[in-house]
Amino acid sequence: MLPGAQPDNPATAMNSRLLILCPGQGGQHAAMYDLARSDPHGAALLSQLAPMLPGLSDPAAMFSNHNVQPAIVASSLAMWEALRRDCPQPALVAGYSIGELTAYSVAGAFTPERTVALAAQRAALMDACVAGDSPQAMLAISGRRTAALRPQLAAHGFHIAIETGEDSCIAGGPAANAASLAIPGARIAQLPVAVASHTPYLRAAVEPFASLLSQEAFGTLQAPVLGGIDAAPVRDKATAIGHLSRQLAEAILWADCMDACAERGITAALELGPGSALSKMLLARHPGIACRSVADFRSLDGIRNWLAHF
């Protein structure tokens, strides 16, 4: 069993209906390590990871792909390190974009150190897919049925990257075409992301990342991880490698993932942060699931008290 994994307790895992959510980019902020650092275990892990992490004091660095991916992974894993001893055995772990890599570490596949290193390598491979004279962009689109958007987006070189609902999605494509993309009835906002993640523009990164993953030690998963590209539970290394590499260039079906969580009987979900976008989306789509983010609490004791109900 790799460090960070919980003891395998089939009876506990069978009774647990807790989902751990691992976020992607978007909720990062300069103080995102502070809460985890208030716990000695979380502080020790952050100290261990510090040489691998970029400084985020510069606002521009906060949205730089190669800075943010390892930083978000480290933030989520430090929070898990602070909480895992007081947390029920998760029934399921799910991650959004780079959060899917975090999810495998939470489940016990990779050590925190190797996960942060993989996040940095993943970011470098993705950045290499962006030509200097052809910058990329990502757009948040809502107000129109996602299925009907595809031909209109394709006409501007855009692809759906993440399906978040029947009438909301994230799309990626050429930055040069972002400003001119207008779809009647749709609300469109450009995101502070300069890589068209989860679209065919990232195809060149898929095989190299799969190769990197294949060389990693892979611990026994203590809970299944939900695959973003098909919303199916993953329990083995080969499938994990396929999902983590393919999702670089394939759309993430996040709406389907949320439905899959409900179908599997999940009753509570904790988002590790930074941010609270995933827990809010899940609560809106499935209000019967008790959803919270660590960002909702002022102290780790508050989170532990909430977890004690499940």
Image: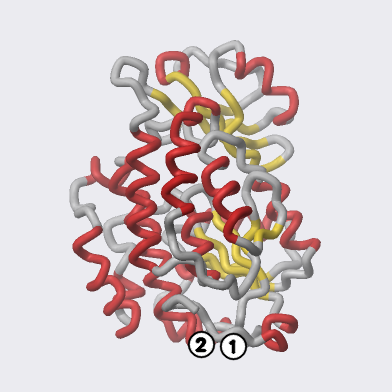
Q: Residue at x 41, y 32 (%)?
A: 195
| Circle 2/circle 1 CB separation < 8 Å | yes
Which of the 4 image quadrants contains residue 301?
A: bottom left
Q: Nearer the viewer, residue 193 or 110?
A: 110
Give amino acid for label 1. Ala
Q: Quadrant of the C terminus?
A: bottom right
Q: Residue at x 47, y 30 (%)?
A: 202
Left or right of residue 236, residue 103 in this image: left
Q: Residue at x 35, y 74 (%)?
A: 36
Which of the 4 image quadrants contains residue 153?
A: top right
Calculate the distance from the C-alpha at mark 2 to the C-alpha at mark 1: 8 Å
Q: Is residue 138 visible?
A: no
- For disc 1, the marked residue is 308
Q: Provide residue 273's location: percent of width, then percent of height.
A: 45, 63
Q: Residue at x 33, y 63 (%)?
A: 32
- For disc 2, the marked residue is 86
Relative to 216, is 98 above or below? above
Element on which disc 2 rests: helix
Instruction: Specify few, some or many for label 2: CA neighbours under 10 Å numbering under 14, 14-19, or 20 or more.
Output: few
Instruction: Specify few, some or many for label 1: CA neighbours under 10 Å numbering under 14, 14-19, or 20 or more.
Output: few
